[in-house]
Amino acid sequence: MLTKFETKSNRVKGLSFHSKRPWILASLHSGVIQLWDYRMGTLIDRFDEHDGPVRGVHFHKSQPLFVSGGDDYKIKVWNYKTHRCLFTLLGHLDYIRTVQFHDEYPWIVSASDDQTIRIWNWQSRTCISVLTGHNHYVMCASFHPKEDLIVSASLDQTVRVWDIGALRKKTVSPADDILRLSQMNTDLFGGVDAVVKYVLEGHDRGVNWASFHPNLPLIVSGADDRQVKLWRMNDTKAWEVDTLRGHMNNVSCVMFHAKQDIIVSNSEDKSIRIWDATKRTAIQTFRREHDRFWILSAHPEMNLLAAGHDSGMIVFKLERERPAFSVTGDCLYYVKDRFLRFYEFSHQKDNQVVPIRRPGSVSLNQGPRTLSFSPTENAVLICSDADGGTYELYNVPKDNVGRADVVQDAKKGGGGSAVFVARNRFAVLDKSTNQALVKNLKNEIVKKSPLPIATDAIFYAGTGNLLCRAEDKVVIFDLQQRLILGELQVPAVKYIVWSSDMETVALLSKHVIVIANKKLVHRCTLHETIRVKSGAWDESGVFIYTTLNHIKYCLPNGDNGIIRTLDVPIYLTKVSGSSVYCLDRDGKNRVITIDATEYIFKLALLRKKYDHVMSMIKNSQLCGQAVIAYLQQKGFPEVALHFVKDERTRFNLALESGNIQIAVASAKEIDEKDHWYRLGIEALRQGNTSIVEYAYQRTKNFERLSFLYLVTGNKEKLSKMLRIAEMKNDVMGQFHNAMYLGDIQERVKILENAGHLHLAYITASTHGLIETAERLAAELGDDIPVIPKEKTHSLLLPPAPLLNGGDWPLLRVMRGIFEGGLDNASRPGYEDVEEEASGADWGDEDLDIVDVERVIQNGDADAEVDDVEANEENGGWELEDLELPPEAVTPSAAGNTRASVFVAPTQGMSVSQIWIQKSSLAGEHAAAGNFDTAMRLLNRQLGINNFSPLKQIFMELYTGSHTYLPAFAAAPVISIAVEKGWTESTSPNVRSPPSLVFKFSQLDEKLKAAYRATTEGKFPEALRLFLNILHIIPIIVVDSRREVDEVKELIEIAKEYVLGLKIEVKRKETKDDVIRQQELAAYFTNCKLQKVHTRLVLTSAMTICFKGGNYATATHFARMLLESSPTDAQAKKARQVLQACGDKRDAHQLNYDYRNPFVVCGATFVPIYRGQKDVSCPYCGARFIPSIQGKLCTVCEIAVVGADASGLLCSPTQMR
């Protein structure tokens, strides 16, 4: 039995396969109907309107309907598309056992414990016939697949066959009036629609099931007498043919297999039995340990069966359907219907070659499993599982291809598997000794080779080599030298496929494909949710494979995708161009045409065959979000640009690929402030100031424009900005522009006009404008500001620009491989250029790059008149002076114009970046300045969501792990990362982790300080210290496993103290409520504290409860205090309390039961007793009542209660 799918549920009483989709309905004893996808292994839907067990369920053959019948006497018809019950048919007076749709007519047949069978019309929703005659429960009833018959089985020990021909004639409208009249007479005077044709008697007990053969006039039945009986019928009578004995308990269900000549039955003896229908003997038995079987169902079109039992159901196959085949060059040898066949791919010819011996045993799965062919010797090895593994060696006669009438006496032998390893040698696996026996074509052992691993199958791996498979790995073994050539860990491999050049191998498991080279060096792994069936290599090195319902591809780098969907599983034999050759489950050769454009395009990109990519882009119909996303992901946004028409997407892709021209064009179309702003940033990054200027003009961002003109030294345009600010009456803008220009008189004038006479006077006198200063002094009179004499003053003047305007060589934007062909191709009106580009050899075409020799150094928009001709000739800027603020003409991008002037050196990787490359420790990420990844790590590991308490800690970590070195005045300060344990002898290429300012040893000091504050009763101070410990721990890094345990212990200690101290602070705030005060004091005693603190807490609780009149509770605390080695004063006080309380009871009922173990909720401060539901903080472990789930932990104040978290990671040793 090959189990394909299994469910765990309540007892399954009814099953039905869908005829087209991979679905199965299971009706349960609990009243639920489940709809499963057995291919994906998922529950699609559940229907639960029945009251009580549902014993019968059935899919309609063509409509989106199914019918169910249950112990509530109701038959319900459902539409699975709308997920609802359409209507209910009422009429039966007892449990309904089975229901079934007719394939052709709108009928449902139902069998019931009310001793009747009813036929219903589901279109008119009425009962059209009642079949009476059984005198006990009717256990099942079903239509004949082709004739107008119904078979029923009953506990009255009979099987009845009913003729419903009259009912069919009545349903099919009568042709003439006479017939219609006789029809009316029958209706009026009680004609019979259904009559008993045969009553089959022979069972000694009640019959549970009976079913028709799909084609032959046979019936099979199963009963409580533990027997399966076979009956034959003709037009006049029916008789018993044979009895199949073997079940040890009541037979629940029995049926003929649709595709094979066998009978399948199951029983309450916890077994499924398979019987040969012709020889009428038992073939095989499958048992379950604890579950009785109740129902069987066969797929109407596929070779699948399902069985329902006490705790679920199984979907299974009896025999493997994959044909044994072997591909050699242009030929395929395969086994079909006991014949070895030969298929030629080029001519698509199919011939029978030799007949193959049938296996002697009758059990299942004894057919050929694998096939190996030696082309030089024309010999074929066929392996099967018969007798624990056997092989047969056949010689294929060259002359008698096609006749195939001579039965050869094949050479046979036993062995797990057998494959050719050389021209005239084959290896056989001897599992008992774990050896490979090398034999010649006379079937004589030539050599024995012990295998290096416990092998359960061998495969061909090149001449003289074997690929040995164990449970979890494969090895390639050289039989001659007895050496292991390669080894790879891989889940149980079922099939292997070598590429034609034997350089690459695909290892196929149930849900995994591993691709490796001939030495088993791993290349990539693919995981599939649906079972992998077969695979073949195409000529370009792409692996094409099939799952149950798809043909897919896998590129050499592991990228994969779907080529097309499949209706039925197929087995690939060869892939040639867009043709896929395959065998189906019936052993027929099929050729499927596929569209290979997508994977060939991706392969060309991967192999950098850009000419191929270009021609595909221009000529093929490639498009869609998937291709665009793939190109973007693989770093080809400039190619993706070609496929996109949406301006926003074009803009984003253009920015990503650094294509300023297209970005400007798209920004113009979109014309939104945000897009112009982003364009400005990218242009500035490329040093393309004219585009930056244009973008700022479009958004009227005058402050940025002024600053841009300052850094480019464009004083002329700065003067214009000053005039604009004046026109707009923007005083600050005027002042800034005057300051950027170094125009002192303008600044004084602005300050004077704004009424700041004091500032105007100081500015004038400082900068030596004596006349203006005197005039202002006269206006100010006695209120002249005093300028300190002893202090030296510096003038606020900007440095004079060395270069005026132009782009600066910040980044060299390389011209993309595709730009020549694609920039223009994507826009209309560029046909000629496109033709030219495709003909040009890349790199030599005209790149519109300015001739540097002939252009002045700055390449400015306002170029010198002398250079205008040179610019025009070489396709230069062609920019006019931009008048502000009106919107100007778009300049052309000049990202490439300086390419040969200056190339900035490529930046190396900073140490802080190296720190975070392989680290999962949040502390190291924070030290490197990567706060966002540190926060993400803490969120994933500890569920931390509130980072405000950690902000200062992060800042200290970052600044503490770097030191700063001033170089010279105008240069920025150089930041140097401080590494842990650095010495002068350390190699500069080896980087140590960061040196962290927070160390675990410091937390010991903090803990002692917190203990001290607790002892002294400074609770707010102690609480602050313990919380600080909890906030530092997430970024601590320790070196050993022992220290990791200590860190976890410290979290537990801090958590207990924080909880206890918060309870105590809360108690002190609760002045009015005496009972709540006593409860909180009692809860504080439950926290795990140091002994000295436990004694103090017990003393406090004892005192509070005694004063509150709760003497019994006070007594309990007094006893606990005496047991905790108290000081003399504490012991004396406790004895006094015990004496005073005596046997007095509590005056108030407290929510505190010391006999029942509990933890205290960190938010509500109420006890959560053992057995009650709770949620916990993923970081500190504090416990809370379920309603706090999803809120911030009130103990550690940083993590979210109940969040998913992987756990504390604070040491590199945890990652090894």
Image (cartoon, rainbow, N blue to C red):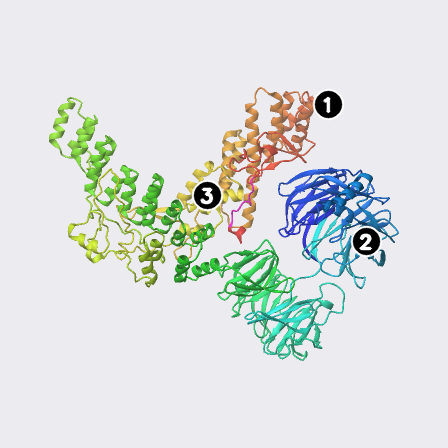
Q: Write down the residue under mark 1.
A: 1143
Q: Write down the residue under mark 2.
A: 221
Dot 1 and dot 3 residues touching (CB under 8 Å): no
Question: Label 3 amino acid?
Answer: Phe
The location of residue 142, given as percent across then percent down, is: 76, 49
The location of residue 380, given as percent across then percent down, is: 64, 74
Q: Identify the secondary structure beneath mark 2.
A: strand
Question: Label 2 amino acid?
Answer: Ser
Q: Identify the secondary structure beneath mark 3.
A: loop
Magenta range is: 1203-1211
Q: Sequence order check: which comes first, mark 1 or mark 2?
A: 2
Q: Write down the residue under mark 3.
A: 998
Q: Quadrant of residue 711?
A: top left
Q: Sequence order check: which comes first, mark 2 or mark 3?
A: 2
From mark 2 to mark 3, how far is it between C-alphas? 80 Å
The location of residue 653, given as percent across then percent down, is: 39, 49
